[in-house]
Image (cartoon, rainbow, N blue to C red):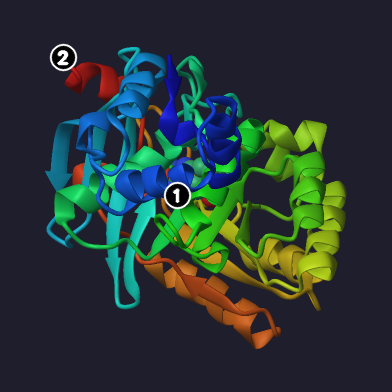
Amino acid sequence: MKNIKDYNLDSLKEELKNLGEKEFRAEQIFKWLYIDKVKSFDEMTNLSLDLRKILKENYDICNFKIVKKLESVDGTKKYLFELSDGNAIESVLMEYHFGKTICVSSQVGCKMGCKFCASTGIPFERNLTSGEIVEQIIAVEQDINTKISNVVFMGIGEPMDNYDNVLNAIGILNNPKGIGIGARHISISTSGIVPRIYDLADKNIQCTLSISLHSANNITRSSMMPVNNAYNIEELIKACKYYIEKTNKRISFEYALAKDNNDNLKAADELINLIKGMLCHVNLIPINKIENGKYTKSSLENIIKFRDYLNAHGIVATIRRELGSDINAACGQLRRKNLKETSI
Ligand code: SAH
């Protein structure tokens, strides 16, 4: 069965046309799904009984079941959702002064193999469909009974490795006739799949691009992130410059500081030389140690020194607040092993 939430408004109109229905029915269905958030076609009372019957016979409405919900002392909430095939994914809701931000997963597992990330070492299962990406937002909005204002693709998975479904999901999220979260409120984070950065630039959809850089040195970066062997730093930065030129949007470079690895002033100098003059800012993250991981957090003193050094050299850098660390919801801590253990 097809999932009705996999369709954006245009493809839903097309689908209804093929069923011999008027296009405006698609807008009605969109409203039911994303504004009223109904869970069955029977509740779509302005559709004819015949149409409801056809829809029921041909489409599913993907509704996530919350298997587990954990709440941090800082207000961060981590959700574990069960998918229709028995797989499980996690999403994290964070409270900021500007509103609520959800960190969504894009895949069940991840192929990228970053050495510091908890998703590594667990087999990749599959891509999420667009509807499964969108449903993370709907299910959480329903749970908290409040609108979510920002979406970041920083949960499990590499969004650029599920490019088509992620872009289609963004199209669904953007639509003002439904959820209505503007592209400017959506960030895609990538480990650096260069061809997709060019593709995204050419789409010019005005979402924020975050690059998980973590080192400006090819040897260090390759030792942390195997993707650097496929697309090195020079190729990555060239693609980023193209993105900025095309979209006029500021890029965000993520830099997780690991003790005695990428946190000294020589590394900071390499970073400054690499990105000087670019329309960008640097997000410094104290690296979270994972089980059996070789990287440990830099001291706060060191992180502040690193930030101040970048700022003094004209690079805007901020330290990311650590949220949800007491519930394993902080950066890089979402892992499928936990999911399997808890999803019984
Ligand atoms: N695959 C995408 C998105 C998921 S990871 C990407 O690589 O960008 C989201 C962010 O968390 C990335 O910046 C990633 O590098 C970072 N991250 C992963 N593990 C981490 C850890 N243990 N500590 C701190 N940040 C981590």
User: For disc 2, does the CB lie below 8 Å from ligand 1?
Assistant: no
Residue 27, numbered circle: 1
Q: Amino acid at mark 1?
A: Glu
Residue 234 rendering spot, x and y as whole percentages: 86, 51
Q: Which residue is mark 2?
A: 344
Q: Amino acid at mark 2?
A: Ile
Label 1 environment density (alpha carbons within 10 Å; few <14, some 14–19, many ≥20) = some
Judged left or right of residue 173, residue 18 is: right
Residue 156 in view = no
Q: CA distance from mark 2 to mark 1?
A: 38 Å
Residue at 52% in and 36% down:
7
Q: Is residue 326 above or below residue 145?
A: above
User: For disc 1, does the CB lie below 8 Å from ligand 1?
Assistant: no
Residue at 56% in and 40% down:
13
For the N terminus, give its image quadrant.
Answer: top left
Residue at 54% in and 57% down:
187
Q: Is residue 88 above or below residue 201?
A: above
